[in-house]
Amino acid sequence: MTNSVNDTDSNTGTDDPYAVASDAENVFWADSVADVIETRRGDTNTEGNEQEPIVIKGGVSPSGIPHLGHFNEILRGYFVAEVLRERGHNVRQLFTSDDRDRLRAIPRQLADSDWNIVGLDEVDAGALGRNLGRPYTDVPDPFGTRESYGDHFTQLLRESVDQLGLDVEFISNTACYEDGSFDEYIETVLSDTDTARTVLSAYQDKVDDEYLPFFAICTECGLLTEDITDIDLESETVSYRCSDVEAGDEVFSGCGHEGTISLRDGKLPWRFEWPAQWAMLGVDFEPFGKDHAEGSWPSGVDIAENVFDIDPPVPMVYEWFTLDGEALSSSSGNVVTVDEVLELLEPEVLLYFFAKEPLKQRDFSIERLDQLVDEFDRFEELYFDERDGEGRETERAKRVYPLLVDEPRKERIRIPYTFAAVLAMTDDVSLREEIARREGHIPDDAPDWAVEEALARVERARTWARRTGNEFDYELKRSAIPAVSFDSDIESALSDLAAFIEDGHEGEAIQQEIFSTAREYDIDVGDLFTAGYQLFFDEEQGPKLGPFLAKLDQEFVVARLRQER
RNA sequence: GGGCCGGUAGCUCAGUCAGGCAGAGCGUCUGGCUUUUAACCAGAUGGUCAGGGGUUCAAUUCCCCUCCGGCCCGCCA
């Protein structure tokens, strides 16, 4: 082995993907990354002397439903891109869909073009099974609307990026192979297979003297096969035998066909393909998951320097998220999509989540989503000097918050998330607003746009309560009375309560009256409350009853307490 | 087996990289209200900084070992 990354001194600083984002000078990791990128390029001033834009890349195989974890590949880069743009640089943010990778397993769940999550029983799973081992772009779209499986899931990812309002250029790996963009890099690798073997063998034991770093798509059966028998760079062709491919526990059977294909009808193995992308696209920065940190990254550095003769990009490792404590996984179906998340919280809250320290293991907890939203609300208040911070909290908020929203607007209104969930117990939109105003969450002079956006959170909290079935998941049974029956004491007590409310009283007075009525009839206070919750929610518990009833329309409340409708 | 990242209050997280009194929000408890029913206000409570050892006047912070969660050394955010 010569000049591997491990025995040069070039690995002391910016090649360490763990160290790049952890400079104590900065309160925001993306600033530390940007510092390193500027130093590396040597064009730290912003006087317009840089010829080429700074290129930031991410990438993923379109293996199934694009879930929250995949957005690390976009959003970690997005923050770095925004910081660099602030500093006056021209930045391109790229995303490669690694869509010539092979379909290795069929996910238990898929998403159709409208983001409906569907099980395998709703598609032709058998057809998918017959396509195992073939490139994603050669597998038919299971929903029959797009050109391929790969196109379908790439398109879904792109829609989520659009929903977040991000400016990202999508690049199809398959398209790059087909249009010849990869040609010179494939030729570089295959023209000196000794060097390729030598470099890679330092990282992979299975590389032997026969190893040829190229895969071919079989012209007969479409399998992406690894058994390359000859390379002819004169004619730019590769000969292969369609042998079985082992991938983990799976074996994809080859058809045995022996054929010859163009360099454009195959692909480089991942370990070479990644550095080839860096070379082809001129990548300056790329974040990647911890899975690549100890394997693909060091070999990629070595291949970049010693096969392609380029500098590798500035790297950054991010930790994986869990979803309510479990690993995110397209194949197992434990996923949450950006589409779903945006039904639960505002985009800026989602961006806030991704602005946190990349190396911390984090759980995205839908059960406790209120905690994340509360944290964001406080962060926002720090930015607007509406709250005192500890240590460098305020400094961080001042730095990061403007990157989360289109435009900081001091007049914005945030209804606390769990209170929004309480408001969502009624579907009367004007009542929601009235209660929010009365409780002081909406100032009298609030602009219309701020009220509208604040109340949009109520719908999101409603969706959250329904999705989790939590303690806020109450629904006022307005249209029909729940099937209940009470003993005569309780019926009388409810009737007295109706009369009291008919006289017109404030919420706290009604609350008091519930207690005194219960005493009067010598019934357990809890039983009377339970009866109330049953009548209005068909549940045994609920929000503080007196104030809630006071805010509903009186005629309805009185009639319901009398069990008339 | 070898290497890497993380572990701070019941929960979600700052602080650790530059050693100097252990922090926030939520929750919980108490009061506001002679009455348990979740929204509001006030106050209080809350810790073996995963565990052990070392260096130091001083360690959550630096070093070593161990445990737990995860990753890499096949493929794959």
Image (cartoon, coloured by chain):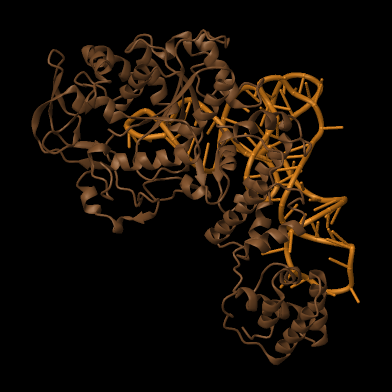
Give the farthest residue toward the bottom: A488
Residue A529: image location, x then y, percent: 71, 76
**Along the line of sight, which residue is nearer the eye, A420 or A214?**
A420
Residue under the image location 69 percent in, 71 percent down: A552
Q: Nearer the viewer, residue B27 or A506?
A: A506
**Nearer to us in this view, A108 or A98:** A98
Q: Where in the figure is residue A314, as x and y percent of width and height?
A: 48, 19
Question: The chain shown in brown is which?
Answer: A
User: Is B44 located above or below residue A251 in the figure?
Assistant: below
Question: Please, is residue A52 above or below residue A409 in the view?
Answer: above
What's the colour of chain B in the image?
orange
Describe residue A252's horizontal placement relative to residue B17 as left or right: left
Q: Quadrant of the C terminus of chain A?
A: bottom right
Q: Residue at x 66, y 75 (%)?
A: A533
The answer to whether residue A376 shows anywhere in this view is yes
Number of labelled discs? 0
Q: Quadrant of the N terminus of chain A?
A: top left
Q: Is any part of residue A268 visible from this angle?
A: no
Given residues A71 and A246, the one toward you in this image is A71
In the picture shown, does residue A159 fall above or below A112?
Answer: above
From the top left corner, tell me how far across and down residue A69 is, in percent: 47, 40
